[in-house]
Image (cartoon, helix red, strand yellow):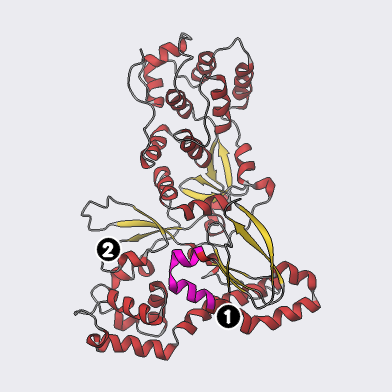
Amino acid sequence: MIEVSLSKNLDIFGCCLLLDGEVQVYNKVTGSMKPRSFPAGTILIDPNYAERYGEGAKRNTLIHEALHWEKDKRYFEILQIKNRASSEKLYPIMCRQSETYYVPPEGKNTKENEVRWLEWQAHRLAPRVLMPHEMFKKKALEIIERPDSANIDLPLSCDSLIERISEFFLVSRSSAKYRLIEVGLEAVISQFDDYADVYAEILESKSYQPLSPVEAYSLTLNDSVFSEWINDGSFIYADGYFILASQQYVVFKDGIPHLTAKAKKNLSKCVLNIREQRCVEYTYACKDFEGLSFLYKTDVKAQDVDRRIYLFDPKLQMSFEKLDPTESYAAALNSIPAYDEDEENQLLGMLAMPNKSLCQCLWFLMENRHWTAPSTFSEYTGLHANYHGKIKNDQYDNMGTDVLMAICIGLQLRLWLIEQIFVKSQNKLTRYQDPDKTYIRILERFPGVTLNDFNGMLKAAKLPEIGTKEKVS
């Protein structure tokens, strides 16, 4: 067994080399993937995956890979002899969290689908090997019928049962929950008062829930692994969802991304699955969320009867295909259409003219948006009305970064155009230093964001908001 990083977002948790072969290994220092050769019989485990998701996840990975060795080695040996091209394309099997609950289509007679069935089998068998049916059921009933023998403080609860049985079999609490149902004990455990609370993720969760821009940003801010899912998969925020930045799923209207009709009908194929579920405090509740990205929907401090959370679980995602370079996130960003193409061309011409001031360029845009009244300007930018007059009268080229950014956000300009305006100004955006770094990240992931949402994201990042009402001297 060798520990190596297999992916940035920890989706790939393991790999078993059934034949000699190469595996793409992630280099944290360079942030790149590089091929590395391993001999047959090598099991690869991502140490970061095991550290994040616990000992139970590591043991599940070992069994998963051992099952591939035991059941699938001969398949690939034959495939290598009969069809080397297919063997090289489909091998090795990279074991992904996002395929945990994936069921391949039946009747699709392709080698790729055959391999997916092999992976489906390993995902299903691993927990059954770790928790054999009769042994697991016997132990669960023993704890239920004689809780004192398991050193459990009375009264016994569904929560404490799951904790004890997961500790006994050295598996995750989630695996123990599903296994209790699979062995036919649902009717027994449903008698516990806390059953509905502990099983809320299975009984009451709602999939593919839309998030507000601020909620979406806060979730990315709270967890680096979730951020890597977005970065690695080339996702963009649109209509409440993180969606693949592909023309077949995203359409831009006035510079703002929206879901296409195809995307709305096929959310599971193009959108990250954010679930909403009821959240109730119980003794081991924190363990149920270990390694997962979550965000409280309601104020944690509020004593709400129905407190809920948004939850991102890699196991409940589809295995999204990599986009073509022409459909990558960077390409999608560069292809965002202008709010008005003629307006943008005129603006770029003005920005290039030495005799045109920053104020004149901004006033050109403001007139096009009908911001002729100071109150309208203030409404969109959050700035004091007297800034309007100073820009109109060409007397404020020395405005600061926060003021200029507030105006650009209010105008709903795309990032590339904002960068050109900043080049014209006395301010320069510093991509790797806050607050500019955060400004740019928000604009990259949330094109067309409103000032109100932009400030909500800055607040979540613990940075000063822009667009104050203070009067400029």
Secondary structure mostly taken by the magenta-highlighted segment of the chain: helix
User: Residue at the location (33% across, 22% down)?
Assistant: 469
209 up-or-down from 435: above or below: below
Of marks 2 and 1, which one's residue comes earlier in the chain? 1
Locate residue 303 relative to residue 293 in the image: left or right. Answer: left
| Residue 51 painted magenta | yes
Locate residue 9 relative to residue 55 in the image: left or right. Answer: right
**Quarter occupied by residue 423:** top right
User: Residue at the location (43% across, 45% down)?
Assistant: 217
Q: Report the residue marked by disc 1.
A: 66
Q: Find numbered disc 1 in the image and state the secondary structure of the residue it sits on.
A: helix
Residue 19 visible in image: yes
| Residue 398 painted magenta | no
User: Residue at the location (38% across, 76% down)?
Assistant: 177
Mark 2 and mark 1: Cα distance apart in space? 37 Å
Magenta stretch, residue numbers = 48-62
Residue 373 visible in image: no
Q: Label 2 crowding class (10 Å Cα cut-off): few <14, some 14-19, many 20+?
A: some
* Three-letter amino acid code at the position of disc 1: Ala
Camera-nearest residue between 58 and 156:
58
Q: Label 1 crowding class (10 Å Cα cut-off): few <14, some 14-19, many 20+?
A: some
Q: Report the residue marked by disc 2.
A: 280
Locate residue 257 relative to residue 467 in the image: left or right. Answer: right
* Three-letter amino acid code at the position of disc 2: Val
Q: Position of residue 49 (x, y in %)?
A: 50, 65
Q: How many marks?
A: 2
Camera-nearest residue between 372 and 428:
428
